[in-house]
């Protein structure tokens, strides 16, 4: 690492190790080993610790005699092991510990770590003190001082009899207590759902269907009908084709024409398989095993089009060395997954999931899944599953070993994220990639990129797209059940939830319960805990969405989120509560000034114009217009290595406070962070940013363009231009623009014109106006039960647009097959109703440029 230094013995005679030093080193190696010498055999080899490798100044991992890796240990223990090894090796001058950055908070708290230096390094320290370079701050940092938000993790030794008894005690007691905890949550969720269910039944009995008041009700009905029709067609094709898929491909005979042809179909089996759902939309997926620097084996999923990509041999998908960012173009296997010629390559995009979720969260909305949308747009999409996931794996440790579960959000960012980025860059051969993260995925990134953690990761990211960024706690943290968790001591927390996985009974239930029952329970439990709803989702796909959660996470990770010491108490991932109070006071003073000069300054600027302005600003070489407050910037979390940042904030998100994060950037507290785009989507809840039916319109298209506009020129020259990014930054696309078509549905064509708000001025009561036509309102559409659309339901309107001859024939064909256009009605072109596209009109979904919200 660039910020790690070692001072070795240069030109000095090696001293002979004493028997005492040999004994001390052997004893320290046994204390930190995987097994005691008596437990080792020919299969395990020697598992004694031989050296500590500092991944960051706060994260020393153990290297064992058999070449394996064990998770992080306390820095003092690592320093002791290395010092004894240096003495045994005869080094007269010990190696210097890592020297990472330290950061001072506004409240005086010091974040980071700096170990005591050997004499050779103290000379440098004295010189720094004379020059006044960070001397007071560095002197204030005691040895092994960690961020106050990340208290030291427990340390466990080899599995002795006493430790085994302790582990079984925690597993038995916590399994009972956590079962009662989970049972209480389930009962609470069911109790909250029963009144709503009875209310719904009563309204249906009175011939008042409340589901018709859902904002996308008509579109849900259409898509449900289209899915059923596609299932029937798939069954008919299967009967005629035997064991072959309806498209006729088998194995290596797949034609390489670049088309998207589904190779799976029929009723949804509700399985946990990204590749299966990719095949339903004409794509496919392959899984790579990735080894982290502390020995965990995590999954990296690659989305591809089988009709233009040949999978590499299975051996190439196995895990590589745990070291990251060390591969070079001359290495074998470098860029093995980038099979396209220059000018037609695909730019890599890595996507990270949220808390208790998995990569499947990006793949459960058919063609409206963000991962599939970006893949079909022309990007090389990779999905990361954080450590443990659905199948906990480590190169050395079994499930029962508590060391496998001694990690939290910091290790997920510093270790997992680095491993994913390194492997994607090796497989694709690009110098950087785009990172798209949701919720906890943004948290682990924000933590990892902090100047005292692993900021050099930022140099490998071309743009960081943060969806529902989780840096500050929302109002939900004040609910009674979360407040109870905050008063529980660490010892009691471990007694209730154990020292292994967090409530593993949830994963057992996932294996035993039928898919629909598990999804129903999962939705209502999460809705009860986090106060979100499925109002904007396609309810016909909701069962699929909750097959991907929860996953295995460590009890220590959940203690970081919910316990009395960390996030729940401080209400921030990188600042203490006292620092938050000081920032609030500053913000109140700023608000008075902003109200005088900002409010209603630009209420009529469109979202497209704001995106253009933000991206133009990104390419500005001398951005003097950016607000850099040096006084506030001295307490910044990040340095110049932080990548360009784009944020999509959910305006109705009670789980996290994205608006407060925007204020931090807007008000000069992060002078090195360059915002390329920011958007507050009012009305959106925490999961709507990836699951709402209009998420592609509100988020996906902007993510697609932001990624491309921030790619360096060298990479752009060798890559294909993604769909929808053909125009320049300052050019505005027409009302009908080229986009990725959907399988078996005209939903994207319709969603581009849906209006949830009041009927625009000039629109007739029938939903039509000059140059416009009603699509969803009053058209005699029926729901799944066959009921006609009632009066007053949300209507849809579309504006007519001018276009060049033949420019959008593919949309007209989609219209003819799936839409309400003239061809579908048996009318002649040019006669009767004509459909086009327009920008969506919403009253509760708009970009908020005002930092006051």
Image (cartoon, rainbow, N blue to C red):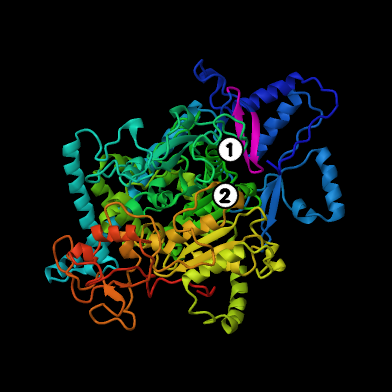
Q: Is residue 544 left or right of residue 783?
A: right
Secondary structure of the residue carrying tag 1 is: loop
Q: Do the CB atoms of the residues marked 2 and 1 lie less than 8 Å apart?
A: no
Image spot of residue 640 (x, y percent): 67, 55
Quadrant assignment, res 284: top left
Q: Is residue 625 left or right of residue 356?
A: right
Of mark 2 and mark 1, the one earlier in the sequence is 1
Image spot of residue 583 (x, y percent): 61, 69
Quadrant that contains the N terminus: top right
Q: Is residue 599 left or right of residue 202?
A: right
**Residue 63 magenta-drawn?**
yes
- In percent of the image, x 81 and y 54: which residue is there? 133
Image spot of residue 587 (x, y percent): 60, 73
Quadrant assignment, res 780: bottom left
Which range of residues does the magenta coloring cover?
Answer: 51-66
Q: Is residue 473 left or right of residue 630?
A: left
Nearest to the observer: residue 147 or residue 425: 425
- In percent of the image, x 53 and y 40: which residue is there? 428
Nearer to us: label 2 or label 1: 2
Is residue 427 among the parts visible in the rendering?
yes
Secondary structure of the residue carrying tag 2 is: helix
Tag 2 residue? 717
- In percent of the image, x 18 and y 73: which residue is there? 790
**Residue 175 magenta-drawn?**
no
Is residue 467 among the parts visible in the rendering?
no
Quadrant assignment, res 530: bottom left
The disc label shown at residue 72, or none:
1
Q: Is residue 212 above or below residue 407?
A: below
Nearest to the observer: residue 823 or residue 82: 823
User: Pointer 1: residues within 10 angstroms few (<14), some, or many (20+)?
Assistant: many
Q: Is residue 577 above or below residue 26?
A: below
């Amino acid at each position: 690492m660039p910020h790690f230094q070692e001072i070795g013995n240069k030109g000095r005679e090696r001293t002979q190790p004493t028997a005492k030093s040999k004994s001390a080193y052997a004893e320290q190696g046994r204390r930190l080993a995987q097994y005691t010498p008596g437990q080792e055999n020919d299969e395990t080899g020697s598992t004694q610790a031989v050296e500590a490798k500092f991944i960051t100044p706060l994260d020393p991992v153990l290297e064992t005699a058999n070449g394996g890796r064990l998770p992080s240990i306390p820095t003092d223990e690592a320093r002791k092991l290395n010092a004894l090894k240096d003495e045994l090796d005869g080094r007269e001058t010990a190696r210097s510990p890592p020297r990472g950055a330290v950061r001072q908070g506004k409240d005086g708290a010091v974040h980071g770590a700096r170990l005591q230096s050997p004499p050779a390094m103290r000379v440098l320290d004295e010189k720094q003190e004379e020059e006044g370079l960070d001397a007071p701050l560095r002197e204030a940092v005691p040895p092994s001082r960690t961020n106050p938000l990340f208290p030291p993790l427990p340390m466990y030794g080899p599995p002795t009899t006493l430790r085994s008894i302790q582990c079984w005690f925690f597993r038995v007691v916590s399994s009972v207590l956590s079962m009662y905890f989970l049972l209480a949550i389930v009962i609470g969720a069911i109790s909250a759902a029963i009144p709503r269910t009875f209310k719904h039944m009563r309204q249906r009995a009175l011939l008042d269907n409340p589901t018709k008041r859902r904002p996308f009700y008509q579109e849900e009905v259409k898509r449900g009908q289209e899915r059923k029709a596609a299932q029937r067609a798939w069954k008919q094709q299967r009967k005629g084709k035997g064991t072959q898929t309806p498209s006729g491909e088998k194995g290596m005979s797949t034609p390489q024409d670049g088309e998207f042809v589904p190779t799976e179909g029929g009723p949804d089996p509700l399985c946990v398989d990204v590749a299966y759902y990719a095949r339903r939309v004409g794509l496919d997926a392959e899984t790579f095993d990735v080894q982290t620097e502390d020995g965990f084996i995590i999954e990296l999923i690659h989305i591809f089009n089988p009709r233009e990509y040949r999978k590499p041999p299975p051996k190439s998908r196995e895990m590589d060395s745990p070291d990251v960012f060390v591969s070079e173009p001359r290495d074998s296997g470098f860029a093995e997954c980038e099979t396209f010629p220059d000018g037609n390559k695909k730019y890599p995009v890595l996507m990270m999931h949220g808390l208790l979720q998995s990569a499947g969260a990006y793949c459960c909305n058919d063609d409206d899944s963000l991962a599939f949308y970006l893949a079909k747009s022309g990007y090389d999409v990779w999905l990361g599953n954080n450590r443990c996931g659905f199948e906990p794996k480590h190169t050395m440790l079994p499930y029962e070993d508590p060391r496998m579960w001694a990690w939290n959000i910091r290790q997920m960012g510093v270790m997992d994220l680095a491993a994913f980025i390194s492997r994607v860059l090796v497989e694709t051969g690009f110098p950087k990639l785009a990172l798209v993260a949701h919720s906890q995925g943004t948290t682990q990134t924000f933590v990892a990129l902090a100047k005292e953690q692993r900021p050099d990761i930022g140099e490998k990211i071309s743009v960081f797209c943060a969806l529902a960024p989780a840096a500050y706690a929302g109002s939900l943290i004040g609910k009674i059940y979360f407040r109870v968790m905050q008063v529980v001591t660490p010892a009691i927390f471990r007694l209730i939830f154990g020292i292994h996985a967090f409530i593993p009974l949830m994963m057992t239930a996932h294996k035993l319960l039928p898919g629909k029952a598990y999804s129903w329970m999962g939705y209502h439990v999460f809705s009860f805990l986090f106060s979100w709803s499925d109002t904007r989702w396609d309810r016909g796909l909701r069962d699929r969405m909750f097959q991907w959660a929860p996953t295995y996470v460590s009890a220590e990770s959940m203690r970081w989120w919910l316990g009395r010491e960390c996030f729940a108490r401080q209400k921030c991932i990188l600042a203490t509560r006292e620092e938050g109070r000081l920032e609030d006071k500053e913000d109140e003073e700023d608000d008075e000034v902003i109200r005088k000069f900002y409010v209603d300054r630009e209420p009529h600027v469109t979202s497209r114009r704001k995106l253009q302005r933000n991206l133009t600003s990104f390419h500005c070489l001398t951005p003097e217009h950016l607000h850099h407050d040096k006084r506030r910037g001295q307490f910044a979390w990040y340095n110049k290595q932080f990548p360009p940042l784009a944020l999509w904030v959910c305006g109705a998100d009670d789980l996290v406070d994205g608006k407060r994060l925007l204020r931090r950037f807007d008000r000069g507290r992060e002078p090195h962070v360059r915002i390329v785009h920011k958007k507050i989507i009012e009305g959106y809840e925490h999961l709507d940013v990836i699951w709402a039916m209009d998420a592609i319109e509100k988020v996906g298209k902007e993510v697609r363009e932001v990624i491309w506009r921030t790619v360096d020129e060298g990479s752009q020259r060798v890559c294909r231009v993604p769909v929808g990014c053909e125009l320049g930054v300052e050019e505005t696309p027409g009302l009908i623009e080229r986009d990725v078509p959907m399988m078996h549905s005209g939903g994207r064509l319709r969603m581009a014109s849906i209006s949830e708000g009041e009927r625009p001025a000039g629109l007739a009561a029938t939903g039509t106006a000059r140059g416009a036509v009603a699509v969803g309102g009053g058209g005699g559409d029926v729901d799944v039960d066959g009921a006609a659309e009632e009066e007053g339901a949300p209507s849809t309107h579309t504006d007519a647009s001018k276009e060049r001859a033949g420019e959008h024939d593919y949309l007209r064909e989609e219209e003819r097959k799936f839409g309400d256009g003239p061809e579908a009605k048996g009318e002649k072109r040019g006669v009767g109703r004509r459909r086009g596209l327009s920008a969506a009109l919403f009253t509760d979904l708009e970009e908020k440029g005002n930092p006051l919200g």
